Amino acid sequence: MKDSSVGAEALPITIRDVTKTYGDVHALDHVSLDIRSGEFMTLLGPSGSGKTTLLMVLAGFTRPDHGSVKFGDREVIRTPPHQRDVGMVFQNYALFPHMNVLANVAFPLKLRKVPKAEAAARAEAALETVQLGGYGQRQVDQLSGGQRQRVALARAIVFEPRILLMDEPLSALDKKLREHMQIELRHLHEKLGMTTVYVTHDQREALTMSDRIAVINHGRLMQLDQPRRLYDRPANRFVADFIGESTFLPVTVEGQAAKVAGKDLLLAEAVDPNRKTELLMRPERVRILNGSVPPDMNVFDATVSEVVFQGESFLIYADLAGGTSIALRASTFSDPAAQVPAAGDTVSLGLHRDDTVLISAEEG
Amino acid sequence: MAVTEIAGLPPEQTAEKPNAEGLRRDATAERMTMLGLCSPAIFLVMIIMIIPVGWLFWLSFLGDDGSFTLEHYERMVNRKSYARIFWTTFEVSILTTLICIVIGYPLAYFLSQLPARAATICLIAVLLPFWTSLLVRTYAWLVLLQRKGLLNDWAIDAGLWDTPVKLVHNMNGTLIGMVHIMLPYLVLPLYGAMKAIDKDYLKAASNLGAGPVRAFWTVFFPLSLPGLFAGGLIVFVLCLGFFVTPAVLGGGKVIMVSMKITDTIEIFFNWGAASALGVVLLVLTMGTLYLSSRLLRLDRVLGGGR
């Protein structure tokens, strides 16, 4: 469903072989990426990974050494920022302090020579879209963090750009507001339908909002996939480690069989015998077995070493027979059937074959 | 207050207020300590500000025989020459400020855009004249600008003009010298204000469709105005009381209030008249400050509020 105020169609973005070096450091190392029309794409990575550099290349603020960036069919790599016609929400919002809210939002319309009355009406409409109708006459310094964020968003969408860029727009907000805004941004994206590129270092934020996530590290694309796929089937150790909680167990591969501590594993996917592999264990995918063993289950015997109460769950550390330690989560139900083991207890742990994922031991 | 008792918390005490008296005494003691620590500063302000200014007022109402009189003020109203002196003072100050802005703004902008190292070196170059005596700088201008000075010689040799141009001992010379001396006072606060402008504002303007020129005039320039006002005001107020440069480079043709005050004391030995001139200059300066604060929203300039 598209908002009637947005006439223009969204544009795909084609990034080819973009490289940017600072001295010896590759901020971007031959990055190629296709962003589909109307897609919500998140660039996820730790600080210094190059995700922001890539966004700045899209906005035109960083000049890469070489490469190609196309918005639709238009090559924009040498187009100055003010001619790119993309909306952008800055990390610190960059609202002009010498203009009131309405003037801020109407600024891009003024530059596009939209008649004054129409510009004011469209700015007001954009403010209403971000649920700030009637705030036009406020000064920027009278707004809360969340409101500034919305004004910045209104200013970025008011001129109906076909591409919207966002640089960690929620990082300055507190946790509750951030989670609320994630859902709201998501809904707004569905409503407006513009191709959106979103930069964050917060994996949960990326999982919550994105159609697809591009994980970036050391200036290179580590994996590009849908949130669920990224979480369940990380392509390498970096992605597995960066997204979600994880413990890694060494695996010995013999032909098509993979063994942990001498026991064959039931696997979700076939083993690639040419790659060194490790078993990825997500704490919430490991369960404590009480006697009966369900089918398709890998079973590990372990001794509980520590139990930590964390509110929504217990975090339990357990030592496997081979001496390696893993973590698992148990729910904090109050009924007696959901007994949580204590430190020193011997337990049987189960990992379903669909959750038994081998990953390459190399970093990326 | 009826509060449900929570396990683990001690029972609420409502009857007594433990330590209330002691805590109040501590607060009072702390305030007295603060006052004590401030007193040297208050004393200093008294000595160097309030007493001298009060004395100045007092003297300006005293006649030669030591009795109360308004004659010093009456003379200023009755004689046209005084009005002209005040007018010249303001004319020189306003022109100097304007020329400083025209030269200083681009200079400060240039400095603010330089990389940190280069900016530091250039700032030192701006500040360097401060380390030379004011008198030396003023006489240096005299050497450069006089009838047979370097500039005239060079210009005539180069064929720019045929006969020496009067660059000194008049308004021209006064303005050249004063602008040179006042420029750093404008550039420094302006540079500070420009450095404080977040580069993201310009990026945002550019992203929203403003070319470099539009971005400058719609975003950078308005945000630099507080610094410009602050610097301009400092220059203007300093100019009002300036003495050495107009005295040397004006050649007696540009008479400012400060020079009149010197004459009054040195030639006529009339402390009362000199004090009255000082008082009027002070009042006019304060009036100007007040007016500009109303017109230019100085609270934002000086308060640093955004």
Image (tube, helix red, strand yellow):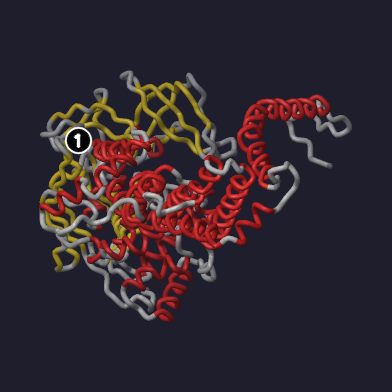
Is the residue marked by circle 1 packed among few (<14), some (14-19), or many (20+) residues within 10 Å? many
Could one spot residue B200 in this view of the protein? no
Find residue A309 and report its horizontal and vertical position in percent. Answer: 53, 31
Q: Residue at x 50, y 52 (%)?
A: B301
Find residue A26 and report its horizontal and vertical position in percent. Answer: 16, 40
Image position of A353 (left or right of A178): left
Q: What residue did someone put label 1 on?
A: A360
Could one spot residue A108 in this view of the protein? yes
**Pick the front one: A63 or B58:** B58
Where disc 1 sits, the SS reads strand
Find residue B56 and report its horizontal and vertical position in percent. Answer: 64, 42
Find residue A302 and report its horizontal and vertical position in percent. Answer: 39, 23
**Pick the front one: A51 or B136:** B136
Query: Total marks drawn?
Result: 1
Tell me the quarter of the image containing the N terminus of chain B: top right
Q: Residue at x 29, y 46 (%)?
A: B111
Image position of A206 (left or right of B49): left
**Pick the front one: A344 or A301:** A344
Q: Amino acid at mark 1?
A: Ser
Image position of A84 (left or right of A123): left
Query: Where, by quadrant of the figure, is residue A90 drawn?
Result: bottom left
Judged from this view, the residue extending furthest toward the right is B15
Q: Mark 1 belongs to which subunit?
A: A
